[in-house]
């Protein structure tokens, strides 16, 4: 349905349309979205636990985690609230390298990301491995600020950004695909921006 | 081939039935849905505009009306100078125009009278919109849940829904309104003229009969960060605070 009087001339000019998923617009800033107050997690209190169901596999403190191999990832990110931001530059530990340090292969096909604030979000394990995702520690070369999820956040840039859990303190392998916080509140179970999987019943 | 009904598009066409200027920068658009639209106070919708060449722009807007407030949905839209969608509403949209709408959306920043209280609402600027839906829902339901709304605006004339809020507060049925202006002196004895802070939250809570069961905070990111930290410093557990942020 064409909207009377609305033209694409309002669209900010860009020669990179192919990088913008359907229904998204290009944002220069870095908006902040979260369901509650911003937790201030001190690195001395920080830990990261890899779990299989309720059972811990391995736990790292901040120093131990920072001793893992650091990888750079520069990616476009896509928020379900319709903004896309190009070329965000992160450094962190690939999920592959976390698994290698724990000496395991992924035990199940599904994973829940866990936040210090109680937030959860589900991601198929294959979307976290093979270099696709990391636990980010730095944004543009500096520690990630609390409002953007620091000290450490998940980065799964090929899915809508609510999957990139802030204030991350663990990854839990699950037998089934278990909906997380927003997935239980109307948002899509998988969240592929290129298929515009925003809400529960989107194909 | 399928025997079932064709999958219904999640988008529906809505018609603008009324336009009401609220403040110099905020205008309400009343939308008539083309199919039944049930929602909860605090939820939002996505609005989609389509250009003749097929280009589409979408944005999320909170609903200002109460779920039981009638057939139309009220969106109170602030004009953003560099926006794509809000300038369309402010400069072009007229009564009778149609746009596409999807929703309702969001299952966290919601309140109904059965959730109980006391309820502490903190809004900055157009962040008051989803809180207004809660306040109106409470009034429509004749709920007596103790509720305080702390509403920060720059100046008196930018207090969205000002007369309606003052009228509701004058009913003295358990709804209390605290206005704070950041660029003008306070107008009413109970109001403030500064940014939200811990002391203001402590005082707002003394106007409730018991500590809040839930707090909702909505506004710009900077506002929500400051207000949520003020609430925590005032003793509200972080787990009781729900936030919604917009802008950069």
Image (spheres, helix red, strand yellow):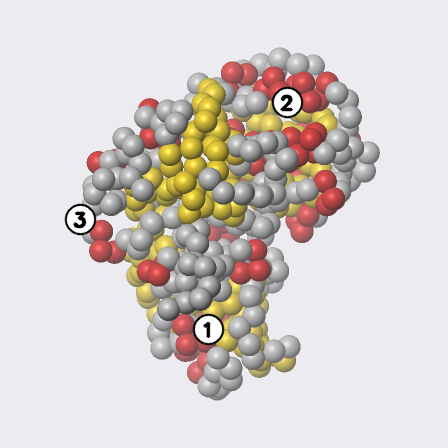
- Provide the chain ID for the residue under circle 2: B
| Label 2 packing within 10 angstroms: few (<14), some (14-19), many (20+) | some
Image coordinates for residue A27, horizontal then vertical, percent: 33, 45
Quarter the N terminus of chain B occupies:
bottom left
Quarter the C terminus of chain B occupies:
top left
Same chain for the residues under marks 1 and 3 in the image: yes
Q: Which residue is mark 1?
A: A124
> Which image quarter: residue B241?
top right
What number of labels is visible?
3
For the point 43% across and 44% down, which residue is it?
Answer: B12
Element type at marker 1?
A: strand
| Label 3 packing within 10 angstroms: few (<14), some (14-19), many (20+) | few
- Provide the chain ID for the residue under circle 3: A
Which label belongs to residue A15? Answer: 3
Residue A176 visible? The answer is yes
Which label belongs to residue B165? Answer: 2
Image coordinates for residue A97, horizontal then vertical, percent: 41, 78
For the point 33% across and 30% down, which residue is it?
Answer: B88
Q: A181 or A119, which is in the foreground?
A: A181
Quote the CA–CA distance across marks 2 and 3. 47 Å
Q: A72 or B186, which is in the foreground?
A: B186
Quote the CA–CA distance across marks 1 and 2. 47 Å
Asked whether the beta carbons under mark 2 and mark 3 sit within 8 Å of each other, the answer is no
| Label 1 packing within 10 angstroms: few (<14), some (14-19), many (20+) | some
């Amino acid at each position: 349905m064409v909207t009377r009087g609305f033209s694409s001339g309002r669209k900010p000019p860009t020669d990179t349309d192919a990088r913008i998923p359907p229904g998204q617009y290009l944002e220069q800033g870095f908006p902040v979205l979260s369901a509650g107050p911003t937790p201030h997690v001190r690195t001395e209190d920080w830990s990261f636990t890899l779990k299989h169901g309720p059972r811990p596999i391995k736990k790292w403190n901040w120093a131990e985690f920072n001793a893992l191999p650091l990888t750079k990832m520069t990616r476009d990110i896509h928020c379900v609230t319709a903004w896309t931001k190009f070329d965000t530059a992160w450094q962190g530990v690939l999920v592959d390298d976390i698994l290698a340090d724990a000496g395991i292969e992924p035990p199940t096909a599904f994973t829940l990301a866990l936040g210090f604030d109680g937030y959860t979000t589900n991601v198929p394990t294959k979307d976290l491995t093979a270099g696709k995702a990391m636990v980010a520690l730095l944004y543009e070369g500096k520690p990630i600020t609390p409002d953007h999820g620091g000290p450490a956040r998940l980065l799964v840039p090929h899915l809508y950004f609510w999957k990139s859990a802030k204030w991350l303190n663990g990854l839990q392998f699950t037998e089934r695909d278990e909906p997380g916080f927003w997935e239980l509140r109307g948002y899509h179970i998988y969240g592929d921006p290129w298929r515009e999987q925003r809400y529960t019943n989107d194909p | 081939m399928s025997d079932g009904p064709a999958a219904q598009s999640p988008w529906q066409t809505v018609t603008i039935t009324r336009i009401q200027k609220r403040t110099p920068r905020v205008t309400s658009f009343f939308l008539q849905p083309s199919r039944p639209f049930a929602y909860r106070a605090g939820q939002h919708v996505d609005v989609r505009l389509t250009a003749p060449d097929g280009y589409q722009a979408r944005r999320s807007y909170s609903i200002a009306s109460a779920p039981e407030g009638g057939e139309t949905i009220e969106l109170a839209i602030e004009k953003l100078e560099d926006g794509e969608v809000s300038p369309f509403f402010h400069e072009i949209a007229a009564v009778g125009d149609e746009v596409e709408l999807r929703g309702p959306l969001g299952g966290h920043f919601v309140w109904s009278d059965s959730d109980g209280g006391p309820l502490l609402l903190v809004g900055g600027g157009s962040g008051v919109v989803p809180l207004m839906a809660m306040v109106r829902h409470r009034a429509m339901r004749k709920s007596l849940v103790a509720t305080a709304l702390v509403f920060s605006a720059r100046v008196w004339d930018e207090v969205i829904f000002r007369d309606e809020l003052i009228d509701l507060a004058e009913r003295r049925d358990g709804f209390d309104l605290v206005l704070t202006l950041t660029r003008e002196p306070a107008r009413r004895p109970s109001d403030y003229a500064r940014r939200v802070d811990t002391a203001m939250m402590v005082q707002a809570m003394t106007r409730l009969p018991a500590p809040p069961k839930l707090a909702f905070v909505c506004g710009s990111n900077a506002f929500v960060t400051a207000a949520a930290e003020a609430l925590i410093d005032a003793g509200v557990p972080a787990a009781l605070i729900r936030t919604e942020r917009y802008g950069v």
